[in-house]
Amino acid sequence: DAGVTQSPTHLIKTRGQQVTLRCSPKSGHDTVSWYQQALGQGPQFIFQYYEEEERQRGNFPDRFSGHQFPNYSSELNVNALLLGDSALYLCASSFAGGPEKLFFGSGTQLSVL
Amino acid sequence: GENVEQHPSTLSVQEGDSAVIKCTYSDSASNYFPWYKQELGKGPQLIIDIRSNVGEKKDQRIAVTLNKTAKHFSLHITETQPEDSAVYFCAASKDSWGKLQFGAGTQVVVTP
């Protein structure tokens, strides 16, 4: 049983560029949440997707957007990258009809130069 | 919004001793409290969780306690082993949507 998979594992971009990160949820899961983890800090909630719609959003600007596909996989897009966007981006999946146990992928390490 | 504070930020213990990490939360509506373990280069791994209608939960060498009145919860690791070395995060949630508010983490180092 594959867990949550994310791609790419590492990414280097320059300020002003745009980036797309990808996530495939754990088998049987239908909900995908994205978190940003800065170095030495706990993950911060970005947003969550269920039934291809954004269900809840944290305190992140509109530069952060996402999408969920019919197969439950998801993308996180960040436009106009800033140096402060450098972080580990984590995808977590869960099953909407069950307990709220979140399972995380290993993340995408984004460096903005 | 919800705020979760976690202490200590670092914890060094001898192998075989116990480790305790404490968290407090601000929103009395929070009803779900998971703990995650994060090893270097990996994503957080759920190790144990507790709901607000339960005061204590154990799973082998780890246990979590919850005091709703005081709004704090703790992780206890007994008979620590070197493989317990990692960063541990507490979190809180007040809905079933999966939005977790995390603490800042505790770096646990178990020395042989």
Image (tube, coloured by chain):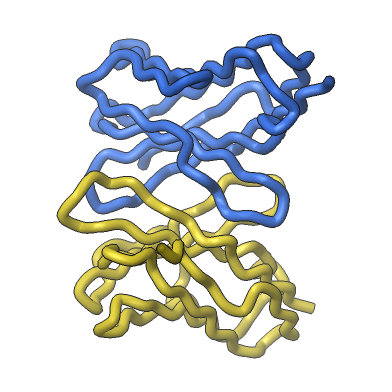
- Identify which residue is drawn at 70% across, 33% down: B83
Q: Nearer the viewer, residue B82 or A36?
A: B82
Which residue ends up furthest to the front in the rendered image?
A1
- Identify which residue is drawn at 24% across, 69% down: A50
Q: Nearer the viewer, residue B93 or B111?
A: B111
- The vertical placement of A106 against B68, above or below, is below
Apparent colour of chain A: yellow
Expressed as whole percent of the image width and height from the top left, the position of residue B45 reads 52, 45
Expressed as whole percent of the image width and height from the top left, the position of residue B66 reads 36, 17
Which residue ends up furthest to the right in the rendered image?
B112
Query: Quarter of the image holding residue A11?
Result: bottom right
Query: Quarter of the image holding residue A7?
Result: bottom right
**Quarter the C terminus of chain A occupies:** bottom right
Expressed as whole percent of the image width and height from the top left, the position of residue B59 reads 42, 23
Question: In this view of the protein, can residue B75 be seen by the observer?
Answer: no
- Identify which residue is drawn at 50% across, 23% down: B23
Which residue ends up furthest to the left in the rendered image?
A97
Task: Please state the total of marks drawn on the protein image.
Answer: 0
- The vertical placement of A65 against A4, above or below, is below
Q: Nearer the viewer, residue A92 or B31?
A: A92
Apparent colour of chain B: blue
Quick check: B30 left or right of A107? left
- Identify which residue is drawn at 72% across, 84% down: A13
**Quarter the N terminus of chain A occupies:** bottom left
Question: In this view of the protein, can residue A21 be seen by the observer?
Answer: yes
Quick check: A65 left or right of A30? right
Expressed as whole percent of the image width and height from the top left, the position of residue B20 reads 59, 15
